[in-house]
Image: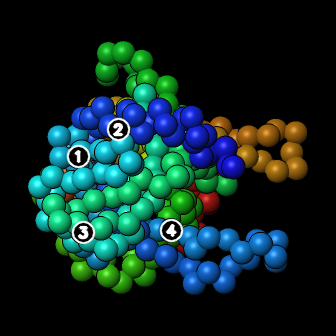
Amino acid sequence: MSNSELTGIERQLVLQYLIDGNVPVTVTEIQSSDNGTNFKNNTEQTEPKKNIKNISWGVFPVALHGEQLTVLSQGIILLKNPPEAVKNFDGKEVRVQFYFNKLGLFFITKMKSIKSGLALVIPEKIKKIEEEPEKESGNFSATLFYESGKKTGELNIKCGFITEFKLFVQPKWSDIKEEYQIKAKKYLEKAVMTSRSIGNSIGNGLHLINVSKYLSQEILNEETAIEGRKTPPAIIYIDHEKIVFAEKKENLLLEIGLEYAIKLGFPILNSPIKERTVYLTFVVENIFENDETTKSCAICKYTSIKEEDVRYLHDKMPS
């Protein structure tokens, strides 16, 4: 049994918890991205990999309130007056996620039609949502602070990174998946017009490609293993003049007009000095949201940075 799976006793406790009622869940259709031909150690066949479908395909997580569910002692969940989005899952394999004592859990099952409506059978295997390892970008690190006097309270947060956004690599329009490019173009045009209308320089505009990509392109859910835990702002672009952060709505931190300080750490190989440290301050120039207002990008310009650090960051970005 995997450490991520509940034991028999744990499963019974969770089942009783669901039976007692008022447990909200989210349901997401899944698909197999593998034909089953992958092998582990060349001998052990692995299960087909499951991926959440992109929102552009009309499939996305649907939240169900506790009062919409009835859980029977046999381990069957009956759905009462489910929304149309859930009805579309009929006959399809779905992932059901919920929290038990703030611990994230999920199981995979099939949505089935019965006389009274729709039902889900809770399988033997219920799994824990495992903590994702902290994403880094080539061991490059960044720690965010409030600049003294600009905000009450203290802030000392290690910034995150998103795998789909490579830092110190010039963004290209082709980095955006073709099915998202029409939507991305709309976000790009809006960002350019808004920036010009308020007098903000967009420079070469490369950073706006990553902004458009983040706002338009659906990225697999960043699930949290502990309920209520917030994720830090993620850096999706950086050069010698600007830095861009991506944030989800429930984790909003950066504010337009406020000034922040940040410490950047660059590993140095084969040197007694293990890291090059860059300290700078920046102000948030603008924040752009997606149409659903579920995520945003904060575009920031530097307000203080040493000349040698400007050259260092400039040299890290290819011409």
User: Amino acid under label 2?
Assistant: Leu
Residue 98 position within the rendered picture, expressed as x and y whole percent measured from the top left: 37, 43
| Residue 177 appears left or right of 285 | right
Report how far apart the C-alphas of labels 3 and 4 lie in the structure: 23 Å
How crowded pointer 4 is (Cα within 10 Å; few <14, some 14-19, many 20+) is rated as some
User: Amino acid under label 4?
Assistant: Lys
Disc 1 target residue: 69
Where disc 1 sits, the SS reads strand
Taking the spot 74% from the left edge, 40% from the top edge, the residue there is 275
Disc 4 target residue: 50
Report how far apart the C-alphas of labels 3 and 2 lie in the structure: 21 Å
Where disc 4 sits, the SS reads strand
Circle nearer the N terminus (1, 4): 4
Report how far apart the C-alphas of labels 3 and 1 lie in the structure: 15 Å
| Residue 223 appears left or right of 269 | left
User: Amino acid under label 1?
Assistant: Leu
